[in-house]
Amino acid sequence: MRTYRFSSPAQIWQIRALAALLLPLLLPTYLSAQPTSFRIQHSCSFDDIEPRANAYLYDPSDEADRIVAEIVDALGLTKNFLVRASGVRNAVATEEGGRRYILYSTTFLEKFKADTRTRWAAYAVLAHEIGHHLNNDNFGETDMRRRKVCELEADRFSGSVLRMLGATLDESQGGIESLENETETNTHPAKPARREAVATGWKKRDEFLRSRGDPGLGQAADRDGDRVPDSRDQCPTEYGTHTNGCPDSDEDGIPDKDDDCDYEKGTLANRGCPTPAAPADRDADGVPDAGDQCPDKKGEKRYAGCPDTDGDGVPDHKDKCMNEKGMAGKDGCPDLAAKQLSESLKLSESSDALLPPEPFRNRKSGLEMVAVEGGTFTMGSPKTEKDRGEDECEHSVTVSSFNIGKYEVTQADWMEVMGTNPSKFNKENCQECAVETVSWDDAQEFLKKLNARFPGRNYRLPTEEEWEYAARGGKKGKRSIYSGDNLIGNVAWYGGNSGNKTHPVGERKANDLGLYDMSGNVWEWCDDTYKPYAGCSGEANFLRVFRGGSWGDGPKYCRVAVRGRVNPLGRHDDVGFRVVQGY
C-alpha cells in the first residue's frame, strides 16, 4: 500500500486528520448490532443544513464503497466511520451512539453520472464528508462562523485528495459547481469561497507531489487509460474499474482475475459467485435477479420485481403509457392514446419526407421508431477491450440521420405482415418475443411487404455503421462494452441469464437512445456484405453481417463491436432483425 505524507505545517486540516484518526483506531471494534435508523441530531452536510429527522440506513452501493475505499487507500489510512445509503437530502457526516457515519442519498450521487464535467463530483462529495471525520469536527457546533471554517477545511481536504487520485483542478471542483446556491447560507460559505478552498487544497498537493518527483498530472505512465498509474496498476494493459486497475465486468468489487463468475455479481467468500443463500438481487427489492423482470429497478413481487410508476395496476414492463394511468386492456394507456395515434398518422402520412418516429407501438400503423441524429463516431473497439476480435480495428465513421426500430421485429410484427410464424420459440405463445429463424432474404421479403403497406416510409435493414452508431447511443451515448452498459446482465438476454430461449423485447435496460436488446436476445441482420475495416486484415466476401449477440451467446459475442457474418440464405434460431427508415 502506498502511503502519502502531508507536506507542510500550513496544511493543518490534513495534520489534524492523522491525529484525529489515531484515537478511533485504538478503540475496540463495536460488536453490537448496527442500527437500521436513528434520529439525526447534529451533522455537517455537503450542500445545506440537514433537518433533524429520522435517517433510515441501507447498505451502500458498490460504487460508493469503491469510491470511499479508493480515497482512504490513497491516503494510506483506515476509515474511522461507516458509510450507509439513506434518505437524507444530499450527503452528511454525523455521529450516533459513539459511531461516526457518512450518509448519502443515492439520487444525489447518481446525478453526477450524467455529465462528463462532474464525473469526479461523487469523489469530491464523499471526500468532503471524510474530511469532516478525519478532522474530528464537532457536528453540534453552534458558532456558525466556526461551522463555515470547518466546511472550508473539508473542501480543502477534498481538493487535496482528488489531486492525489488524478483529477484535474476543474474536475476536483465538480462537486462545488453542482451546487445551485451561489450565496452564503447560515451553515455554509458562499460558492466562490468553497471553490477557492478546493483549489487551495489541490494546488498544495500538486506542489508537494511535484517536489517529490511526480512529473505532474496526466504525465504518469498509464497505458490502458483507466486513471490508475502503471506503477500501481495490477493490470496495466487492461482498462479497469477496480481500484487496483483491473477489469471488474460485473461490478461486484471483485476484479475479474480473482472472480470465478466475472459476469455475475457475487461475494468475495464465494470467489465472486452468487450463492443460493444470497442470490443476486442488484436492485435490492427482495426479488432475486433470476426471477426479476426488472432487475435494475426496485419493484414489487406481485409485479415480478417491476415498479408501477403511474399506479394503475399495470407494471411498467407491460405498460406502454407508464406515466399515465390507464387500463390493462389498453396496455396501461388511457383512451386518449388512440385519438393521439390517429392524429399522428394523419400528419405523418401527408408528407413524403423522412417520417418522425411514431408516438407509441401499434403494428397496424407501423413499427415504433426512434430518431437518431447523424454524427461522427469511432467504430470498432480499442486494443485494450477484453475479448476483442482481430477485425474490430478502430476507425472514424460519419453517418446521416435516420430512424431505427425501438425494438427488434417481433413474432407478432412478422405475423401481421407475412401471415406465418417461422420462429422456433413460437410454441411458448410469445408473440412479443423477437422473431427468429429468418434468413437475410426472408427479412428482405418482409420489408418489401411492409413498404407496400406503408408507402413512403422506406423501411430497410440498417447498414453496419448505422447499427453500431445506434447501439453506442448516437451522440448521446457513453461508450460502453455492451449497448447501454458495461454490465451485460443489465441490458441483455444472453447465455448466462436467458434460460436458452428468446424473451419478449424491451424487458432489459434500454441504451442512451432508448433502444432495447441491441445486445443479446437475437443477432440482428445488417444490410452489408462482410468487408474488413480500414487497417484490419481480411478479405471481403458474400456473407451478410449480423450484430449484437444472442440468447445463446456468452458476453464476448454480445459486445457492441463484435461482427458476425453468415450465409444470407441461412435460417438460425438466434438470428432476427430490426428495421430503419432513411432516405
Image (cartoon, rainbow, N blue to C red):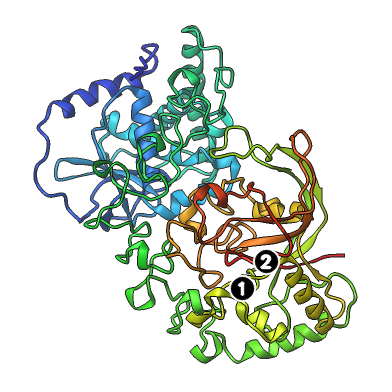
Report the quarter where the C terminus lies: bottom right
Q: Which of the numbered marks, if any, corresponds to residue 297?
A: none
380 and 200: which is toward the camera: 380
Vertically, is 535 above or below 65? above
Amino acid at circle 1: Val
**Relative to 582, 120 lies left or right:** left
Percent position of residue 137, x then y: 27, 33
Can residue 149 be seen in this snapshot?
no
**Contact flag, marks 2 and 1 (Cβ < 8 Å):** yes
Report the quarter where the N terminus lies: top left
Can residue 381 be seen in this snapshot?
yes
Vertically, is 345 above or below 317? below
Dot 2: element: loop
Which residue is most to the right? 352
Residue wearing tag 2: 577
* Marker count (numbered): 2
Percent position of residue 92, x then y: 34, 45
The quarter of the displayed image where residue 288 is located: bottom left
12 and 522: which is toward the camera: 522
Dot 1: element: loop
The quarter of the displayed image where residue 434 is located: bottom right
Residue wearing tag 1: 435
141 and 536: which is toward the camera: 536
Amino acid at circle 2: Phe
In terms of sequence position, does the residue under pointer 2 or pointer 1 come before the other?
Answer: 1
Residue in the picture at 25% in, 46% down: 42
**Relative to 107, 339 lies left or right:** right
Mark 1, Cα crowd under 10 Å, few <14 / some 14-19 / many 20+, is many
Instruction: Calculate the distance from the C-alpha at mark 2 to the C-alpha at mark 1.
Output: 8 Å
